[in-house]
Amino acid sequence: MANSLKAAQEQLIVLRKAYAQQIPSRVAQMKEVWKDLLESWDQENLDTLHRMTHTLAGSGATFGFEVLSDTANTLELFLRAIISNGYPPTVEQQTQINALLDSLQEASGDLHPSAYVYQLVEQTFVKHPLISTMDERLILLVDEDVFQAQTLALQISYFGYTVEILQHWTEIQAAVLRKPPSAIIMDIVFADGNLAGTEMITTIQRLRDRPIPILFMSERDDLGARLQAARAGGEAYLIKPIDVGYLVDKLDRLTTHQPAEPYRILIVEDDSALAAYYALILQRVGMIAVVVSDPLQIMQPLSEFKPDLILMDVYMPGCNGLELAAVIRQQEAYVGIPIMFLSMETNLDKQMVAMSLGGDDFLTKPIQPDHLLSAVTTRVQRSRILHSFMVRDSLTGLFNHTKTKEQLTVEVRRAQRQNTNLAFAMLDIDHFKSINDNYGHLTGDRVIKNLARLLQQRLRKTDFIGRFGGEEFAVILTDTDGPTALKVLDGIRQGFEQVRHQYEGVEFSVTFSCGIATFPTYLEAIKLNDAADKALYTAKHAGRNQVVLARECC
């Protein structure tokens, strides 16, 4: 953390110095525009001077130059009043504006460094630490029954977790000191006592600054045991025999703390120093930020970068933020992207106009880094949730049929452009109707969720997993040839066959069949789909519980 803070401070100091070096020329340019206005009153030049002043008021405060910002803000109010009146300034107004421009010029020569930079960085990045990409997925499993522990550990390992088995609660403290786990699965009853497990966990957690997620398990189902588990900070209470699907679901929720993908923020800001500043703040907490300095060049990054949110200035040359938001909202593909306006504008009526043209929020400059991060995070989280309802299957959380087919077309085009391999697989759970008939639809749903989770754990983040419908799944494996795809999916098939599902104390296993087709053997998305479907049909009729690779070209 210390190195990260120092790096952020150094970057911000560089940005602040670069900004300070630009100010004298900016002020000189403003005085030139004002001089031209006095010689020949022109609405376009007046708008330009107002925009330049408005920008300086916001950016100056952002970099800690309060005197400069306050002076620019006063000047901006004078200019706004003149614009509202629709008449050239009076002699008195001209004198005041001249004085304010002189004050700006004087303030621009006194932009020395201050402790502001260090305070700003420390306040921001202590509250919003760097997003960690590490995920050890180490689980401690503590159970005196060795056979039962080994069986459960094997089941959990199929879902991508590393499990270390401990036979006695006294071994936990040393194991935690050796390598802190992502979670502990703890039996309650040991030979030493009927609640020895909860007592040991309570002791361990008291010695830690950050508690370890705990899942208690036991054959006991009485209120007394459950109460002690809750008092010890247990996140779940599992009754033996353990339903591995439910257990893994709990583990996933407790050990996955960050979004699958970093937030993608598109910054539209003509002030390069201010844009770099916003980008630095966002990037230092793990977001990806792309800057567009010319609002007229937004369409290509909008389509290629696919942002989660657009952070947009209101006053920009050539096209202001309100006009740009209206253009973006006219395109169906971008209707759902949140747009946050940034401006010194405090007029509520004008802010409401901005909202009516497609904005989702209005942040007033200068905005503190902490407030910026909180506002962006909240908006992106909400947007991703709403978006997931449209493109994801409600039971599994995987992409739905429509989104999967769309993505297959996208990936085929990418493979064509980049001349790379691509594999498309279709999976179908064997004899699924009999599962529903024998164990009920709720159990059938749990089987579907278990396979979905296994696919998510065993495949790469770059692979695309969808639920095609019912018990059928589809997988797009990028940069993958046929033999590799066959090996990967057959490994998943073998793992799924070993998973034990529970229904009223009865254990049963399930298998799936799979068909694979590859690009460039099949050059179009629809032909890949058809070929994979036929290969799946072949696997079903060859006895099920196998993976078949389509080898013949269409």
Image (cartoon, helix red, strand yellow):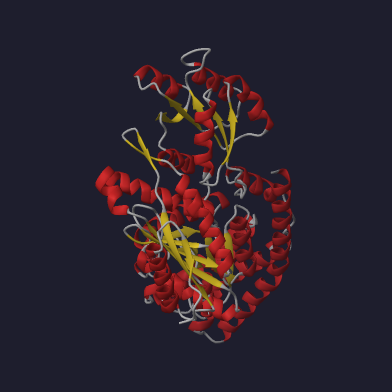
Which one is nearer the viewer's eye here, 7 or 233? 233
Which one is nearer the viewer's eye here, 511 or 57? 511
Q: Position of residue 452 (x, y in %)?
A: 42, 53
Give the number of callouts: 0
Q: Position of residue 93 (x, y in %)?
A: 52, 71
166 up-or-down from 308: above or below: above
Q: Quadrant of residue 14?
A: bottom right
Classify residue 102 as left or right of residue 206: right
Classify residue 491 as left or right of residue 451: right
Name the residue rendered at 42%, 59% in the picture.
513
Which one is nearer the viewer's eye here, 222 or 447? 447
Name the residue rendered at 47%, 21% in the picture.
188
Q: Quadrant of residue 535?
A: bottom left
Which one is nearer the viewer's eye here, 54 or 412? 412
Q: Quadrant of the N terminus?
A: top right
Is there any visible trace of residue 456 in the rendered image?
Answer: no
116 up-or-down from 58: above or below: above
Q: Residue furthest top?
A: 192
345 up-or-down from 251: above or below: below
Classify residue 441 as left or right of residue 146: left
Q: Position of residue 340 (x, y in %)?
A: 46, 62
Q: Quadrant of the C terminus?
A: bottom left
Name the residue rendered at 51%, 51% in the picture.
457
Q: Residue furthest front?
A: 542
Q: Position of residue 172 (x, y in %)?
A: 61, 25
150 up-or-down from 144: above or below: below
Is there any visible trace of residue 10 in the rendered image?
Answer: yes
Classify residue 231 as left or right of residue 210: left
Name the residue rendered at 70%, 69% in the picture.
22
